[in-house]
Image (cartoon, helix red, strand yellow):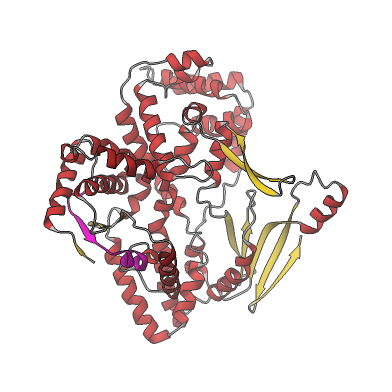
Amino acid sequence: MKLIDQHTKRIMEGCKERAAAAGLKFDKETLEYYVSNTDMIELSPKNMIPTLYDYWVQDIQVLRGKGEYEYYPNNPYETVINTRPVISFYNNNNPDWLNVMIFYHVLAHIDFFQNNKFFQHTWDYDFKEKALTDKRIIARLRAQKKRQVDYVIEFARGIDNLVGFHHSYQDEEDNKQFSFTEKVDYYFGRFLQEIKNVPMNEFLEEVERYNKDSEMPDPEHEAAFLDRIRLKYPEFDSLFEKSKDHKPRHKDQDLMQFILRESPILNQEENKWMKSVVEIVRETSLYFAPMIRTKTMNEGWASFWHENLFLNDDRIKGHEIAFAKINAGVTALSKVGLNPYAIGWRLFMHIEEMANKGRLSYDFRRINTLNERKAFDSKKMNGRDYIFHVRENYCDFTFFNTFVEQDFVDKHKLMVVGQRINHQRQTREYYVKSRKAKDYKEMLFDNLYHPPYITFKRKYDSDLYLHHHFEGQELYRDYIPNTLMGLEYLWGGRVFLETTELDQEAMRKAAGRDENNVKPIFHRVLYTMKDRKITKENF
């Protein structure tokens, strides 16, 4: 690993000037390194953070990566990590024109890291330096506590997807002052959508009516608005009062933080060192959390800008065809799998086009006929500003949920592909399952990172009780025993897990009665871990 040469650095600086002129925002100072494919393989288990703490699983992943490389050699174009300054890694055999394309891609990643609000907890410190400090702490503890340190790391990593990432942002939002009262918030947030379940057009009309009233100079507009609500819905006030007494969703959703605070064994004086290790694992997980939740947006944003800036760069004249070949390979749509570069890039282009034509407005959404929708163009031409707004405020879920619509699905001929058995040919075949935006959006949601929703509490003073809220997908059963054993180790008492599983016995009985129409049958079960022995019982 070594710094790039001065010639390549000048190319990068030229890319920075053009990217900044186009509107991208990033720190001026960056570090670029040449790395070999072996370096890439060895850094990948540490998510390309050279200073991340050592752990035995990383060594196994390196061995696996080297074995895979022997059979399937590949050559990654770049890798960039969100540090201060930002560090990026490149192969040293790229031609200059390809480096221009790659540098634009990397600069768009940096712009995303440093401006998307889901990364805001990473803006105030250099994780690389913090990781180095954490690595030294763990090395010192290993010299004293031996393999016990690795036990704590392994058990903590078993629950590092339950760190309350969104909850940390909710605390910040709770402290902000909103411009509307609790009653108006309740009216739009719960009453219309959840209790009355009004159609979307009626909901939008109410929003528009409130916005128009709020523009009036009369300071009593909100009181008048609430009076109209009471005339239309006499039960509104009583339901609002009841909602204030309703207990909200369990607020403490950071299991690792809860264990650090409440664990009887971790809070014993001789075990305080364990808390340092668990906290290191927790903070590392929080650092990587926004990257997982913005993968498609991040890659789509980078792909959007590497094409836009590359084609307008006078330094690459004559290499357009070579660029087109590589760019097509990166952004090609997959009929079966999902390519985040392809989906994100097309969605950003779609959003820019829609905003330029004013098609993100309420007026456009009211149009039902296909010809009118195709002809609609209010020439607002604010698409570029709007995609910067999206880049700043959205994650993958809100990105898909807001902008994946039937127009987008039809334009790019997207589809949901299913599998079935062809009994006549004795083969598995693919078929077009749906071309509806609703179904395609659900497929995108299913491929997003979705940790289980688990709430927890102390029970009988020394027990830990976990409650898994079933959301259509059961926990991975093979992981349950080891995870609960690790929790028992960190908690120092019995651990209970209440969850939902497929009832295999009931399914077999149902299949015997009607083999062609068997639906999944679920039931609640309770796992108990005590003295490293697990038991399971049905509710």
Q: Residue at x 74, y 44 (%)?
A: 424
The residue nearer to you, when weighing 231 against 455, is: 455
| In the image, farthest residue toward the right | 513
Left or right: where 230 falls relative to 169: right
Left or right: where 269 falls relative to 486: left
Quarter of the rendering containing residue 475: bottom right
Magenta highlight on residue 39: yes
The answer to whether one can see residue 77 in this image is yes
Left or right: where 135 falls relative to 202: left
Q: Residue at x 41, y 78 (%)?
A: 273
Q: Which residues are magenta?
A: 27-43
The answer to whether one can see residue 220 in this image is no
Report x, y in % for residue 174.
43, 45
Report x, y in % for residue 119.
35, 50
Report x, y in % for residue 103.
24, 48
Q: Residue at x 31, y 25 (%)?
A: 382
Task: Give the mark count.
Answer: 0
Q: Residue at x 56, y 70 (%)?
A: 487
Note whether 102 is above or below 345 in the view shown. Answer: below
Note whether 339 is above or below 523 in the view shown. Answer: above
- Give the quarter of the figure containing the N terminus: bottom left
Report x, y in % for residue 160.
48, 63
